[in-house]
Image: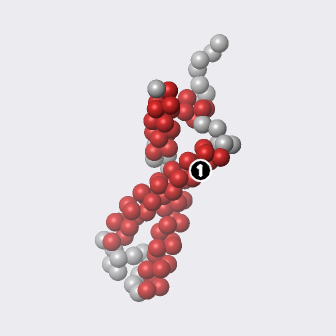
Amino acid sequence: MNDMLPIGQTPMAIKADPTKKESKKANEAIEGFEAMLVQQVLSEMESDLEGGSIFGKGVEAGTLGAVGEWELAKSIAKSLDLGIEKQIFQLTAQKESK
């Protein structure tokens, strides 16, 4: 029997069944965490800008900035592989195997 995995897949990726309700919830939570992490980085970067936001100054800019920042963070988190999901699934699998 061939023990080799397809390129780009880890044992955890194969073991995690995305059709299971718990796995789907875990993936959503991890994606949310990654987006929150990216948002914090974006927020820190924006604080150095004149006016503190890419949207300028004022209440509207703060509201627009928060929504825009969150959407941008979600998009970046989905497009980048930060490795957090893989690490969490590996740790979970290690604990389950003990």
Q: In this picture, is 6 found above or below 68?
A: above
Residue 90 can be seen, yes or no:
no
Amino acid beneath label 1? Lys
Residue at the spot 60% in from the left edge and 36% down from the top edge = 16
Residue 82 can be seen, yes or no:
yes
Q: In this picture, is 82 found above or below 2?
A: below
Location of residue 28 in the rendering, given as x and y in whole percent from the top left corner: 57, 52
Location of residue 98 in the rendering, given as x and y in whole percent from the top left corner: 46, 26
Residue at the spot 63% in from the left edge and 15% down from the top edge = 2
Location of residue 20 in the rendering, given as x and y in whole percent from the top left corner: 66, 42
Residue furthest to the right: 19
Most foreground residue, 8 or 13: 13
Q: In this picture, is 49 found above or below 15?
A: below
Question: What secondary structure is found at the residue carrying circle 1?
Answer: helix
Residue furthest to the left: 48
Q: How is the image coloured?
A: secondary structure
Q: In this picture, is 59 found above or below 28?
A: below
Give the quarter of the figure containing the N terminus: top right
| Residue annotated with mark 1 | 25
Location of residue 21 in the rendering, given as x and y in whole percent from the top left corner: 65, 46
Residue 8, by quadrant, is top right
Residue 95 relative to residue 51: left or right: right
Badge 1: residue crowd in 10 Å (few <14, some 14–19, many ≥20): few
Residue 17 relative to residue 53: left or right: right
Residue at the spot 51% in from the left edge and 56% down from the top edge = 32
What count of labels does the image hold? 1
Residue at the spot 45% in from the left edge and 35% down from the top edge = 91
